[in-house]
Image (cartoon, grey):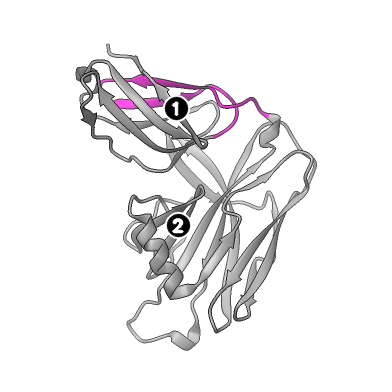
């Protein structure tokens, strides 16, 4: 099981098209979590490593058997890269990642020559099945022995790219907002995962409400996520503006205060 990155990686993750790029001083078996200061980290990571990945989101529809990812080494030296697949689930509104072999990823470890692009294939192992399957394709820059120094950690980059399989075989997301005493909740009664970049919450008089964990998040089908608000029920009627799957959504949450 993979837990969120904490102290082993600098908490400056670049949110790029739904994926995460994390600047690390050492890499442990974690998947990068989002951070509000991602743009600066992305620029610093690119300057230090020049590792880039395209695309930053993968969808393998029922009619497809594979997708291709481009991993580029923009440096003047060879770069070793490891590519792994993790199943992506949610438990109590939190993301959980576990190693997976559901899809074939080839190559899984490769040395990319200077200023060259390596094509990585993500392939099905069987026919399409009902239900959306979710994964993260994790691309890690591996340490360069030539740069090893005693007591000094090398700075490297990790990308964690969302992968959705058979997304076209489920019902669209159906979202409902709810305000409880302690949280603002978003319930997805549909089948497809929804991507929420940021939310803006305002009271009836126009004053903004501070929201914790207000960054890139996903809510799976038939699941829910929450943002801590403190005493949410004391806020009265609130208005929400959110960026969901590239669209601006306005909503008024239903109070659920007992």
Residue found at x 38% / y 86%: 149
In the image, 239 versus 112, the foreground residue is: 239
As measured in the structure, the alpha-carbon distance from the residue carrying label 2 to the one carrying label 1 is 32 Å
Residue found at x 20% / y 27%: 207
In the image, 3 versus 256, the foreground residue is: 256
The local crowd at label 1, few if under 14, some if 14 to 19, many if 20 or more residues have their Cα within 10 Å, is few
The percent coordinates of residue 64 (x first, y second) are 77, 45
The percent coordinates of residue 124 (x first, y second) are 75, 49
Position of 179 compared to 64: left or right? left
Asked if residue 182 can be seen in this view, the reply is no
Callout 1: SS: strand
The percent coordinates of residue 78 (x first, y second) are 58, 82
Q: Quadrant of residue 28?
A: bottom left
Q: Quadrant of residue 39?
A: bottom left
Position of 167 compared to 206: left or right? right
Residue 238: numbered disc:
none
Q: Do the residues labelled 2 and 1 touch (CB within 8 Å)?
A: no
When the figure is inspected, residue 9 is found, relative to residue 212, above or below; the finding is below
165 in the magenta segment: no
Residue found at x 37% / y 26%: 185
Residue found at x 23% / y 30%: 208
Residue 30: numbered disc:
2
Q: What stretch is highlighted in magenta?
A: 170-193
The local crowd at label 2, few if under 14, some if 14 to 19, many if 20 or more residues have their Cα within 10 Å, is some
Say which of marks 2 and 1 sits in front: 1
Q: Which of marks 2 and 1 is nearer the N terminus?
A: 2
The percent coordinates of residue 231 (x first, y second) are 20, 24
In the image, 29 versus 240, the foreground residue is: 240
181 in the magenta segment: yes
When the figure is inspected, residue 150 is found, relative to residue 133, above or below; the finding is below
Residue of label 1: 249
Q: In which quarter of the image is residue 191?
A: top right
């Amino acid at each position: 099981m993979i837990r969120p990155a904490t102290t082993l990686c600098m908490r400056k993750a670049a949110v790029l098209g739904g994926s995460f790029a994390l600047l690390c001083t050492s890499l442990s078996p974690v998947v990068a979590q989002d951070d509000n200061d991602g743009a600066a980290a992305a620029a610093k990571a690119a300057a230090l490593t020049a590792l880039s990945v395209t695309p930053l989101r993968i969808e393998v529809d029922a009619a497809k058997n594979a997708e291709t990812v481009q991993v580029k080494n923009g440096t003047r030296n060879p770069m070793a890269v490891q590519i792994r697949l993790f199943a992506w689930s949610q438990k109590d509104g939190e993301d959980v990642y576990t190693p997976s072999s559901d899809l074939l990823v080839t190559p899984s470890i490769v040395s990319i020559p200077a200023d060259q692009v390596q094509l990585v294939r993500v392939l099905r192992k069987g026919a399409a099945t009902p239900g959306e399957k979710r994964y993260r394709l994790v691309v890690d820059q591996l340490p360069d022995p030539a740069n090893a120094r005693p007591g000094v950690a090398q700075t490297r980059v990790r990308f964690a790219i969302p992968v959705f399989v058979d997304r076209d075989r489920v019902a669209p997301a159906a979202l409902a907002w709810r305000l409880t005493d302690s949280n603002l909740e978003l319930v997805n009664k549909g089948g497809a995962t929804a991507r929420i970049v940021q939310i803006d919450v305002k009271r009836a008089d126009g004053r903004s409400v501070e929201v914790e964990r207000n960054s890139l998040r996903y809510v799976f089908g038939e699941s829910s996520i929450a943002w801590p608000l403190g005493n949410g029920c004391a806020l009265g009627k609130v208005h929400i503006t959110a960026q969901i799957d590239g669209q601006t959504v306005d909503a008024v949450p239903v109070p659920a205060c007992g």
